[in-house]
Amino acid sequence: MGKISAEVRRVALQLMEAILEGLGLGKDYQHEEFERGLQLLQVNCYPKEPEGESAIGLAPHSDHGFLTILLVSCPGLEVLDRSSDTWRVVQQPRHALHVHVGDYMEVLSNGRVKTVVHRAVLNPGEARISMASIHSFAMHEKVSVAKKLVDEQDPEKYKESSFSDFLDYLMSNADKKRMSFLESLRI
Ligand SMILES: O=C(O)CCC(=O)C(=O)O
Ligand SMILES: [Fe+2]
């Protein structure tokens, strides 16, 4: 587990640099904050789909960090196509990793790069395991819109927040039907 986490972290940081460069911020933008950031591993185990029923394994959501790298044992991942508001099945080439952009990437880029809304459905043929590696800043480090991506036509669209603010948000809304964390940050 230690080796795969370290390798996945290396890939995530390299992808982050490429995205930052693509946004015109330069690959070293907030380099230290990314370097000392958090990596969270979440392992999901789903049972086989009961016969004749279709069932959701993990409800629709977006991930809170900058990037998620996902390893899955078999198909079951679906992403929301924003243009048609329909779910698209994600193909699963053998041994391929999936990369999701998360909420903090949408915040940092001032909405230029959109978070991916996704869900997992149960697989009729077999039980399923997935391992999500989520990459974010450190617990109390604030993520904010890059000032270079703000101007009169494109005002700042999100409030700053940290991972600890995200946890507080989850706790405070635990028993309510709630808007997503990202929606709560919209200005
Ligand atoms: O199991 C999957 O394919 C998705 C897992 C996921 O979205 C998550 O852990 O955040
Ligand atoms: Fe997810």
Image (spheres, grey):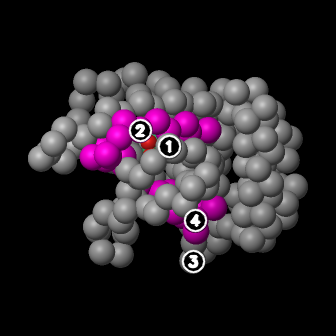
Left or right: 36 as drawn, with respect to 47:
right
User: What is the span of residues highlighted in magenta in the rendered image?
Assistant: 109-133
Q: Where is residue 109 in the image (x, y as percent from the top left)?
A: 63, 61
Which secondary structure, mark 3?
loop
Viewer-side residue, 151 vs 88 = 88
Residue 155 can be seen, yes or no: yes
Mark 2 CB in 8 Å range of ligand 1? yes
The residue indicated by pointer 1 is 73
145 is within the stretch colored magenta: no
Instruction: Tell me how far mark 2 sits from mark 4, CA to CA.
Output: 30 Å
Instruction: Tell me how far mark 1 sits from mark 2, CA to CA.
Output: 6 Å
Viewer-side residue, 53 vs 78 = 53
Of circles 3 and 4, the one toward us is 4
- Which dot marks residue 131? none
The earlier-in-sequence mark between 2 and 4 is 4
Residue 178 can be seen, yes or no: no
The residue indicated by pointer 4 is 113
* Quarter of the figure with residue 169: top left
Of circles 1 and 4, the one toward us is 1
Residue type at tag 4: Val
Disc 3 crowd, CA 10 A, few/some/many (<14, 14-19, 20+)? few
Residue type at tag 3: Gln
Residue type at tag 2: Arg
Up-down: is 138 above or below 143? above
* Quarter of the figure with residue 16: bottom right
Mark 1 CB in 8 Å range of ligand 1? no
Q: Position of residue 135 (x, y in %)?
A: 66, 40
The quadrant in which the N terminus is found is: top right
Of circles 1 and 3, the one toward us is 1
The earlier-in-sequence mark between 1 and 2 is 1
129 is within the stretch colored magenta: yes
- Which dot marks residue 128? 2
